[in-house]
Image (cartoon, grey):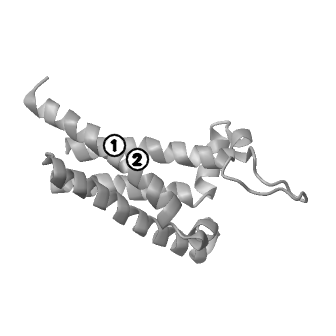
Amino acid sequence: MTPAGIEAAATFGATLPALLVAHNVADHWVQTSHQAGAKGLPGWPGRWNCAKHVSSYTAVTAGSVALIWAAFGLTISVLGFVLGQVVSAVTHYWADRRSTLRRLAELTGNDGFYRLGAPRAGKDDNPSLGTGAYVLDQSWHWLWLAVAALVTALI
């Protein structure tokens, strides 16, 4: 492996866990309950709440990557940093509008899994974090965080 390849691998290896930790904090602690409940609503109320969530989310992920960049002297370009954050933010917004991810689940034959654990119409079911929709949402985010880390490391 070339020295540039070693540096890129080290940058990816440091960036991905930083993004995953930041994601978990931003998605579960920084996001407000109102944003979580309203970001999937149709129209401007949903788009606005999703945009507010993704803005605070991106501040946390950008701060996390900036911290490891400075702490470890990583070879991250400004363009790589910005594009990595854009990949993360755009894909996060797309999934968090909910209808988009639900449609993807339907297209891929995962609609049954998407609905797993969801409250049933006319039943006194309580929503929980144990739904198929939540698992698909989180795995989607993790996929794109890995892509964001690659973009950050390679550009």
Report the label total.
2
Q: Would residue 144 be found to the left or right of residue 107 on screen?
A: left
Q: Relative to residue 91, is residue 31 depicted above or below?
A: below
Work out how far the residue at label 2 is from the one at label 1, CA to CA, in angstroms: 6 Å
Instruction: Point out the residue furthest to the top here.
Output: 1
Which sits in the foreground, 136 or 72?
Answer: 72
Q: Which residue is mark 1?
A: 16
Residue behind mark 2: 20
Which residue is drawn at the image coordinates 45% and 44% (left, top)? 142
Identify which residue is drawn at 41% across, 68% down.
56
Helix, strand or loop at label 1? It is helix
Residue 91 in sight from this viewpoint = no
| Residue 22 coordinates in the image, percent (x, y) | 39, 54
Q: Amino acid at mark 2?
A: Leu
In x, y percent, where is residue 114?
A: 68, 45
Q: Residues within 10 Å of mark 2 (few under 14, many from 20)?
A: some
The C terminus sits in image quarter: top left
